[in-house]
Image (cartoon, helix red, strand yellow):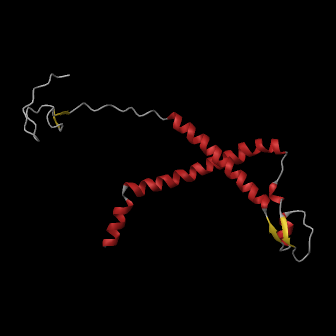
Amino acid sequence: MKIINEFKEFAVKGNAVDMGVGIVIGAAFTAIVNSMVKDVITPILSLFTSGVDFSNWFFIMKAGKGGGPYATLAEAQADKALTLNFGSFLNAAISFLIVAWVLFLIIRSINSLKRPVQVTADPVKTKECPYCLSNIALEASRCPLCTSHLEKQPAE
């Protein structure tokens, strides 16, 4: 029973609930960012690269059973050739940069919508003893540290 009570206490703590909400929102946010990259950014990028598909850029390190040549990476992999797939890596790197850029732009936009936090100054509640320089309450007529008599200061 003790372990169940400890689990209940952990599960309803603010940190665990906040983490769960963050994961769910993160998953939804990932879908939005991936859609923006796939459906908006990538087609625009294809206009500039003439639709080049980097995924078929590979280097054959060891030919497979058929001996090659291979027109596509899929053919090389089907023939069990040992390949260095630098095109797939290049695709992943470009995709990462696009996702990172889009995420930066989205977060920057969200941050610009936030209202700046206004810091209000707390009213002064203490004054300094002119004799020992310790902090004392404004209403004090005697310093608790050095026991000096203090003159009343006018209210500001």
Query: Is 22 situated above or below 85?
Result: above
Residue at horizontal 44 percent and vertical 33 percent from the top: 116
The part of the image, by quadrant, that contains residue 117 is top left
The part of the image, by quadrant, that contains residue 143 is top left
The part of the image, by quadrant, that contains residue 131 is top left
Is 2 left, or right, of 69 in this rendering? left
Name the spot of residue 79 as percent of width and height, x first. Answer: 86, 73
Query: Is 94 situated above or below 109?
Result: below
Is 132 left, or right, of 80 in this rendering? left
Residue at horizontal 77 percent and vertical 43 percent from the top: 45
Query: Is 138 situated above or below 97?
Result: above
Q: Foreground: 84 or 18? A: 84
Name the spot of residue 109 as percent of width and height, x first. Answer: 57, 37
Q: Foreground: 77 or 144? A: 144
Name the spot of residue 20 as percent of width and height, x first. Answer: 47, 56
Query: Is 49 situated above or below 10?
Result: above
Q: Foreground: 60 or 4? A: 60
Residue at horizontal 42 percent and vertical 55 percent from the top: 17
Residue at horizontal 14 percent and vertical 24 percent from the top: 153
| Rendered-image quadrant of the N terminus | bottom left
